[in-house]
Amino acid sequence: AHSLEMGVLTEVSNEEELERAIALGAKVVGINNRDLRDLSIDLNRTRELAPKLGHNVTVISESGINTYAQVRELSHFANGFLIGSALMAHDDLHAAVRRVLLGENKVCGLTRGQDAKAAYDAGAIYGGLIFVATSPRCVNVEQAQEVMAAAPLQYVGVFRNHDIADVVDKAKVLSLAAVQLHGNEDQLYIDTLREALPAHVAIWKALSVGETLPAREFQHVDKYVLDNGQGGSGQRFDWSLLNGQSFGNVLLAGGLGADNCVEAAQTGCAGLDFNSAVESQPGIKDARLLASVFQTLRAY
């Protein structure tokens, strides 16, 4: 292989194979987390074997990796990851790669097509379109269509105590990926909305966090957004409230920018919801701030 200027990845799955790789002087070692006898996955294999390799060895963690949280945690042990079926099983490969490498991140309050493109180019999966009249980032259907035409984000419509018919109409006209409820919508409202929405449109519910973490017990809610107040305030809540819990279907919002996005990502939420901290003024996103945020997230 070396005579042909090719690299060699030496795969190991146990202590014996690891010792052999070390004896061979392997420079790139792949630790397979899958037991090829029964196809079970054990990510502890990377945690246990990687520290026994020298600092001059490039470690690749293989198999069983399908979430951003796993990548962040295992990055303390591995230099890279081999991910196959967890990505190829998705219809939208680009979004799947972003989800694993950066998290399920959203840029909310988009009002211009160029900002949607900047968000997509930076690494966002979701784009937020606000239909709340009192918001400085409010858009109408025509403006939303212009934004959506500029970049292939998955678009989320943000509503607050709207008539269900209005929510459904905009979801259908704009082919929204999800609707995000930011008001006092109760279970009856959500049940009725679920029946009226197309099946592919997800329902997200924003919850205001005060001194305690609110329960996430609504039926028919696919994702939650934890925010400080009604959103767009640019203020964070006490993130220590998130310690020791699982947040696989939660996005964290509230004053997120390059200075605190890594700390936010370490809370274990599935993704982050960016808005005012990546703007030059309300409703106008700053492409440099967006790029900085996602570059910071990449540098875990």
Image: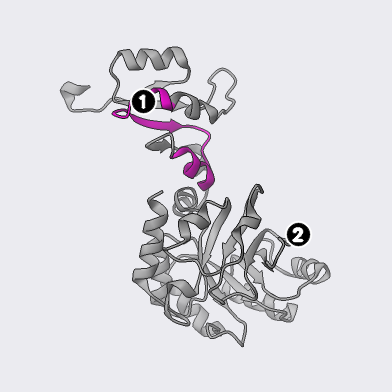
The magenta segment: 50-75
Tell me where residue 143 appears, x and y as whole percent: 50, 83
- State the residue lying farthest toward the right: 188
Disc 2 on helix, strand or loop? loop
**Residue bearing mark 1:** 29
The correct choice, above or below, for 97 with respect to 261 in the image is: above
For image coordinates 54% across by 83% down, the residue present is: 139
Say above or below: 251 vs 10. below
The three-letter code of the residue at mark 2 reads: Ala
At 54% across and 22% down in the image, what residue appears?
A: 35
Asked which secondary structure carries label 1, the reply is strand
Q: Amino acid at mark 1?
A: Val
Q: Position of residue 239 (x, y in %)?
A: 60, 59
* 187 on left or right of 143: right
Which residue is rendered at x = 53% and y = 20% of the image?
36
Q: Vertically, is 54 above or below 189?
A: above
Distance Cα–Cα, label 2 vs label 1: 44 Å
Residue 64 lies in the magenta-colored region: yes
In which quadrant of the rendered image does the N terminus lie?
Answer: top left
